[in-house]
Image (cartoon, rainbow, N blue to C red):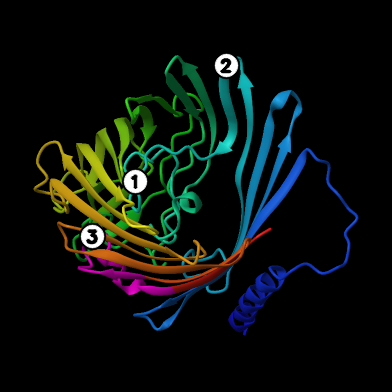
Amino acid sequence: MMRATMQRAGWLGAMAILALSAPPATAQVHFRLPDWITPSGLLELESAYGISTGAAQKTELSFRPRVDMRLPGGATLTGIARLRGDAYDHLDPGSHVKFDLRELYVDLTVGGAYLRLGKQQVVWGQTDGLKLLDVLNPQDFREFILDSFEDSRIPLWTMNLEIPVRDFVVQLLWIPDRTYHKIPEDGAVFGFTAPLFRPVIPRGVAVELRETEKPDRLIADSDFGVKVSTFWKGWDLGVNYAYLYDDVPVLFRRVSLDDAGPRVTITPRYARTHLVGGTFSNTFGALTLRGEVAYQSKRYFITSTPQDDDGVLGRGEAMYALGFDWFGLSDWTLSAQVFQSVLTGSASTLPRDRLQTNVTGLVRRDLQNDRLTAEILWIQNVNQGDGVVRPKVRYELRSNTNVWLGADLFYGSGEGLFGQFDHGARVVTGVELGL
């Protein structure tokens, strides 16, 4: 009964969005905010229907209010919140309704430097679909990688200082916020089940999962980062360094023997790593070339052998991404990317290859003076042969109202990063109203 009521509420929400997007009535509103306060917002309804399950996956209504305020001295204050309600609760069990303070930061100039202070997103990198350098903000994986990067990033309390130095910009980051990836629970639609994320437990052995050990020192356990960027002979160049915690907890394993028999104790613990990398991009006529390189000094991977002492193996990981965007045909965008990562040392006991390759392809067509957009994004893991295909059509009803229809089609082995979600293939439809 409650679910049916919430379903009706979802459809009523959609009707409300469409009604709000209609031309305004002649009634006058006399209340007016001061000129230094600018409110705005976004109202969105999105529904997803599971193809393989034959059941609704979500009907979600979200409201994202925003306020921008001009402060004395040329400073500005920005606040963004999000109120989200889902009729089905399959993506994040136990969270039918959730309120988040998404961002709250002050922008100001200090001498010739630019400072953003508060809860915010810091974006390093320029890849599509998959991330390489864009790891400063943790991610909410309630919809795996299907949500937009902006919506899935978890903003952090950060000091972000940018200092112009001749032809360079030096960015300094201090991130004392110890928030990490939000991983879906077991039983959620996009709960991780692939061997890459789950330790090997011999059959019949008791398992004890302990509480995650989180760093708790304000300064010593903060993340720090620096980026130097410049423009040189047509090239946008950047060099990045960060000393940070990997947002994925390491599942350390210990095997013991008591009166009841063998027991496996799993202790999740976050580990430090150094990240060194860079970005580059340039345009050659209708072709844009862009890329990223990165090296993490220590990544921990779950071993595929139950005999390993602690169940994990530490390796350095070198990565690169290379992207090509072509705009040679009017109203068309053709894009391709290749991602590769290679581990230092042997990977014979790991559930992944030492050299891992992913490729992506995007075809987009804009029609009706950009009011209608049709696209298809394809992501493929070369090693496992699994992937996801994402066709989507988006139409602008009015300047502040958009509707869309799409699908997320997973395929491949259940042991792969994408194939593990074969049961999550779905059709998605939504409507969005800017306020």
Residue 377, picture quadrant: bottom left
Task: Specify whether residue 419 is painted magenta.
Answer: yes
Mark 3 is surrounded, within 10 Å at the Cα level, by few (under 14), some (14 to 19) or many (20 or more) other residues, namely many
Q: Residue at x 64, y 50 (%)?
A: 81
Q: Which residue is mark 2?
A: 112
Q: Which residue is mark 3?
A: 380
Closer-to-camera residue (315/201): 315
119 displayed left or right of 301:
right
Disc 1 versus disc 3: distance between alpha carbons? 15 Å
Q: State the extent of the magenta-drawn residues as a range.
A: 408-427
* Numbered disc 3: secondary structure: strand
User: What label sits on residue 127 in the rendered view?
Assistant: 1
Q: Is residue 353 visible?
A: yes
N-term mark: 3 or 2: 2
Picture layout, residue 2 above or below residue 225: below
Specify the amino acid type for callout 3: Gln
Specify the amino acid type for callout 1: Thr
The percent coordinates of residue 26 (x first, y second) are: 86, 68
Closer-to-camera residue (108/215): 108
Disc 3 versus disc 2: distance between alpha carbons? 45 Å
Q: Residue at x 91, y 55 (%)?
A: 30
